[in-house]
Amino acid sequence: MASLAVVPSRRPLYEQIAETDEIAAIIEALDEANELTAERFDELSRELIAKIAGTRAKIDQTCAVLAQFEQAAEAAAAEAERLNERRKYFDRQRERLEAYVIATLEASKLTRLDGDTSAVSLRLNPARVVIDEGTQLGGDYLRIPAIPGPEPDRSAIKAALSAGVEVPGCRLERAKRLVRS
């Protein structure tokens, strides 16, 4: 008969940290009340060490998963770039073949070629405007884009706030980020 291995429960990191904090608080409370016996201290210390070791292992596992996600994202970005280059290659090949077929039809003075299941034909595209380089156009033929309005100078605002100057409606805020080591 095979023996069953004991598998540790998969508790979230926040629960493990809360349990560690709870044991530390019990030790402090018993010590302040002078009710912490040597036996109880040893027992709570063993529990605390076990919880911390579990928490450390959980942190290591969490960092390993974060590293896997980062590697997967990098691999996906590389694959996206590879696929984008492949798409560009196929676009160039299509354009080259279309230009060849157009040249063949024009050289043959044909406007259509039929196959068994498909056909190609020459059609005129809608007219497009071509402006020769150096052409000076009159105002009726120019569009003047709207000028963007003033925008906040974040560098100047940050410098002022860092120096203790109050800037109405502005504040310095520090976001948190996760650093793995």
Image: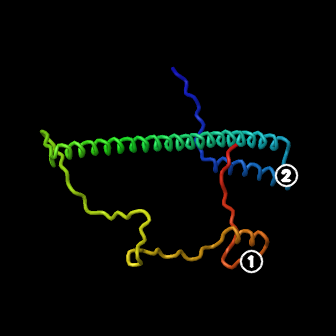
Q: Callout 1: helix, strand or loop?
A: loop
Secondary structure at numbered mark 2: helix
What amino acid type is highlighted by mark number 2? Asp
When asked about the image quadrant of residue 153, the answer is bottom right
| Residue 144, quarter of picture | bottom left
> What colour scheme was applied to this rendering of the protein?
rainbow
Q: CA distance from mark 2 to mark 1?
A: 47 Å
Residue at 31% over, 43% down:
94
Q: From this view, report whether residue 65 is shown above or below residue 141.
A: above
Residue 60, x across and y down, in percent: 66, 40
Residue drawn at x 66%, y 47% as measured from the top left: 16
Residue neighbourhood size for the residue with mark 2, other residues' Cα within 10 Å, grouped as few (<14), some (14–19), many (≥20): few
The image position of residue 179, as x and y in percent, is: 68, 48
The first of marks 2 and 1 along the sequence is 2
Q: Nearer the viewer, residue 17 or 146?
A: 146
The kind of residue on which mark 1 rests is Glu
- Front in this rendered view, residue 122 or 84: 122
Q: Is residue 16 left or right of residue 107?
A: right
Residue located beneath label 2 in the image: 31
Question: Residue 22: image x %, image y %?
Answer: 72, 51
- For residue 16, the mark is none
What residue sits 30% from the left and 63% below the top? 128
Disc 1: which residue: 166
Side of 59 relative to 35 (left or right): left
Residue at the top extreme? Answer: 1
Residue 68 location, quadrant: top right
